[in-house]
Amino acid sequence: MSIRLYNFIFLICFFPLWVLHFNFSNFIKFLIFIILFLFIYFNSLLLKSIKNKIYLTVYLSFLFTFGIDNSLSLFSDFILYNLDSKSFFLTNNYLKGLIILILIFTFNFLFIKYLNKNGIKIITIFISTILFYNFFYSDKSFKNFPEFNNLKVEKTYNETTLIFILDQMAGINSVASSTKEGNYFDNYVKNFSKENNAKIYENIFSSCFRTRDSISFLVNFYNPKNPSDCIAIENNLIKNSKNFYNKYNMHKNALFELFDSISVFQNYFINYCNHKNVNKCDQYTQFKSYEYIDDFNSNNFSLIISGWKHYGSIFGNIIWRTLLQFKFISSYDQSSGEKGSFLSRLDAIENDFLSKKYDLIFFHSLASHEPYAFDKNCNFKRENFINYRTYNYDKKLLAHNLDRICIIEFIDQFLLRIKKKDNTIKTNLIILSDHGTRIKSDPNDELNSIFIYKKNNGFFERVLETENIQNVFKKIFLDTKN
């Protein structure tokens, strides 16, 4: 077989379709394709030096293994969705990936060895077909990204409700509050509530352990009696999404029915933007321009590797994790990227608030979610994020407390800014979490949540009774006395 055919095989196996599907800059696209053609040149030189048929078979088997993984996105579309820890003897997804790559490589090697040129042609046609299909029909296209801004909004609102859902943040008197830093957090949010004339619920719990259930019941004003009743999908409140950029779609949303013009700031996990009253949808993605927090170390190399990983191949995920471990890149993945862009997103929320175009601004953030990354000075520390899985219980509690202190500090600064810029807008504010930290199996750790409610012209109050976030949320919006 000719060098040209082998170069074609290399091209289809290594073709970075994810570069075209994601919203990279033209400079990055140009850079990646220059690198690709340099690799093709080196591929020609390498093939000319291979004289042994077995060595050639090994090399082609590797190329085909890479191509199958690259075109099928085996890590995201197969491992994460099919090989959960209960159905596979390994819990580490990267090890699962390595085993699958070895199996595919072995199959390719035997296929080529016994079928020779016919085996090469069959695998080449297989990969080419998948690549062609994904080029035109893959859902991993930025065209499917759920973001819009309805510029036709003309009505202005003198009263705005701000709802911040801080994912996986423990509340007052939780297990996390038993440490020195946790005690500081409790006192800090009490003072924060006092300064903002807000109610602080000091013993409040979610009914549900999982985010999808907790928030689905919350926004639909349902209060499950037991955690076993938290089955939002079966209750048709939320549905699995077929869109690559979202895991779930909120199917019913009684909260949004109460407002006329809504601005949503969301993450990949739940898409709230299908509701008719949403006039603006802003979803976090690493392919947008943010002013990342100091020490996040945003750069093109990190963005390229993160994009490759995000598309879902095993090779991309393993290389991403290796480079991350040695601090060659930063992670734009959801929790890390949302921490790094949190201040930038607060600035965007500030602009929406001051525009008076929205009577509800709804923000569901993973910035408070593990792995944690802030230090005591609220600087972003990559090593904290990278090494979180190796932390013992006490160190995880410390990391969570530092993150939740910093997130509330950032919101505190945000509220001071908007008050200073325009104090005529009547403001209602709710800060809550969907559940607790889940660092250990303990209801006071898994379900204990933060809940702060500031009503316009309200007053400071410490609510000491044991409450439920779904029930309190329902009372706020459906009981006019609150």
Image (tube, rainbow, N blue to C red):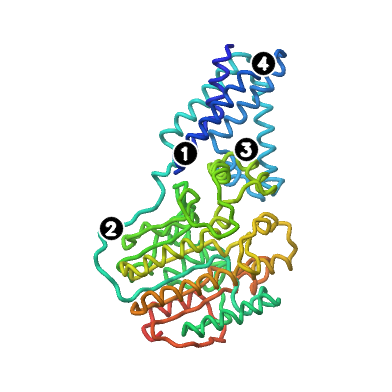
Q: Are marks 3 and 2 in contact (CB under 8 Å)?
A: no
Label 3 to label 2: alpha-carbon separation: 42 Å
- Residue at image coords 55%, 62%: 367
Give the x, y percent position of residue 51.
70, 13
Q: Are marks 4 and 2 in contact (CB under 8 Å)?
A: no
Of the numbered discs 3 and 2, the one sitting upstream in the chain is 2
Residue 151 badge? 2
Label 1 to label 4: alpha-carbon separation: 44 Å
Per the image, the residue denoted by label 3 is 315
User: Is 11 on the left or on the right of 92, as rendered?
Assistant: left
Q: How many marks?
A: 4
**Quarter of the figure that contains the N terminus:** top right
Per the image, the residue denoted by label 4 is 114
The kind of residue on which mark 4 rests is Tyr
Of the numbered discs 1 and 4, the one sitting upstream in the chain is 1
Per the image, the residue denoted by label 1 is 27
Of the numbered discs 1 and 3, the one sitting upstream in the chain is 1
Label 2 crowd bin: few (<14), some (14–19), many (20+), radius 10 Å: few
Give the x, y percent position of residue 136.
41, 33
The one nearer the camera, 370 or 257, is: 370
Q: Is residue 304 above or below residue 196?
A: above
**Quarter of the figure that contains the C terminus:** bottom left
Q: Is residue 89 above or below residue 360?
A: above
- SS of the residue at dot 2? loop
Give the x, y percent position of residue 330.
60, 50
Q: Nearer the viewer, mark 2 or mark 1?
A: 1
